[in-house]
């Protein structure tokens, strides 16, 4: 693919912190090559801002390989930008045309307070994981491959759920700012495996309760979360999470009734 040069108009959200009102500021991105990634384009803009003695645009990133998801922000109202199943760091400028006007802003959700500009605090996801996204049993060393007792189709399904990188695009795209897709993936991939059975009931209750406590909204099946997920996590996992939650509630009620019958 031949290289082209682009001149773009960027409207970038600037905000000094969670208590600042924030505003859009307009910048010109000149002579941007189509071989650049979106973050490389922002690097070029920032170099020019620094040369002018201005504060560069703050954005988060780490791997720049579509693995960690920390780069996430909105591009023209779409989480991670126009290319499906791609993180913002892997969006290349060939997706755009010369003269395009781009609006760049952070995730918008109560559970993701803005740290600065395009950076949001996603530690709410960490607290949801801490509430139950772990196993307590000793798993020992890795067994010989031919001795693994988990059927392949089950292992494949667990890996499909485990692909979630926790970027938060699902929350940003959802009209309700729901974290159901993220939470469902984390609950489901452990629920499918024998190692995850010890905490299975408590895991569903605790992680959903923590999700609610963080201020995320409820799922109403809009499907926007799956549409923007860079790893293609399916809505089916939300249905499974709901089943896990109902099963956990039933088990809890049964346990209470049993204890009452025994006079405990």
Image: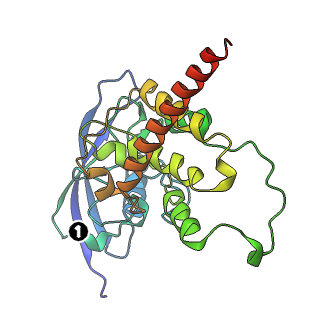
Q: Nearer the viewer, residue 160 or 79?
A: 160
Q: Which residue corresponds to the image point at 39% horizontal and 42% vertical from the top-left?
A: 180
Crowdedness of circle 1 by 10 Å Cα count: few (<14), some, many (20+)?
Answer: some
Q: Which residue corresponds to the image point at 36% horizontal and 62% vertical from the top-left?
A: 38
The residue singled out by tag 1 in the image is 96
The percent position of residue 192, horizontal first and vertical second, equals 57, 55
- In the rendered image of this protein, does residue 36 appear above or below residue 129? below
Q: Nearer the viewer, residue 219 or 105?
A: 219
Judged from this view, the residue extending furthest toward the right is 141
Quarter of the view holding residue 242: top left
Drawn side of residue 140 relative to residue 106, left or right: right
Judged from this view, the residue extending furthest toward the front is 261
The C terminus, quarter of image: top right
The N terminus, quarter of image: bottom left
Q: Which residue corresponds to the image point at 31% horizontal and 75% vertical from the top-left?
A: 34
Drawn side of residue 123 relative to residue 232, left or right: right
The percent position of residue 5, horizontal first and vertical second, equals 26, 75
- In the rendered image of this protein, does residue 86 appear above or below residue 201? below
Drawn side of residue 254 relative to residue 167, left or right: right
């Amino acid at each position: 693919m031949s290289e082209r040069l682009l001149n773009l108009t960027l409207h970038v959200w600037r905000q000094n912190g969670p208590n600042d009102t924030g505003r859009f500021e307009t910048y010109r991105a000149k002579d941007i090559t189509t071989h650049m990634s979106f973050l490389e384009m922002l690097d070029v803009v920032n170099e020019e801002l620094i040369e002018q003695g201005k504060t560069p645009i703050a954005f988060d990133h780490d791997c720049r390989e579509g693995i960690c998801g920390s780069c996430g922000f909105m591009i023209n109202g779409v989480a991670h930008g126009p290319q499906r199943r791609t993180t913002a760091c892997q969006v290349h400028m060939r997706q755009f045309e010369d003269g395009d006007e781009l609006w760049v802003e952070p995730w918008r959700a109560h559970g993701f307070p803005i740290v600065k500009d395009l950076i949001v605090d996603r530690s709410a996801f960490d607290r949801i994981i801490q509430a139950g996204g772990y196993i307590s049993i000793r798993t020992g060393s890795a067994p010989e491959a031919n001795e693994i007792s988990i059927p392949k189709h089950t292992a494949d399904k667990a890996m499909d759920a485990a692909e979630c990188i926790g970027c938060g695009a699902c929350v940003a795209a959802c009209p309700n700012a729901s974290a159901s897709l993220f939470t469902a993936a984390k609950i489901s991939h452990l629920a499918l495996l024998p190692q995850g059975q010890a905490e299975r009931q408590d895991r569903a209750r605790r992680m959903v309760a923590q999700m609610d406590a963080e201020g995320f909204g409820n799922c109403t099946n809009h499907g926007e979360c799956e549409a923007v997920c860079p790893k293609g996590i399916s809505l089916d996992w939300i249905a499974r999470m709901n089943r896990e939650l109902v099963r956990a509630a039933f088990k809890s009620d049964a346990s209470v009734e049993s204890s009452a019958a025994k006079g405990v």
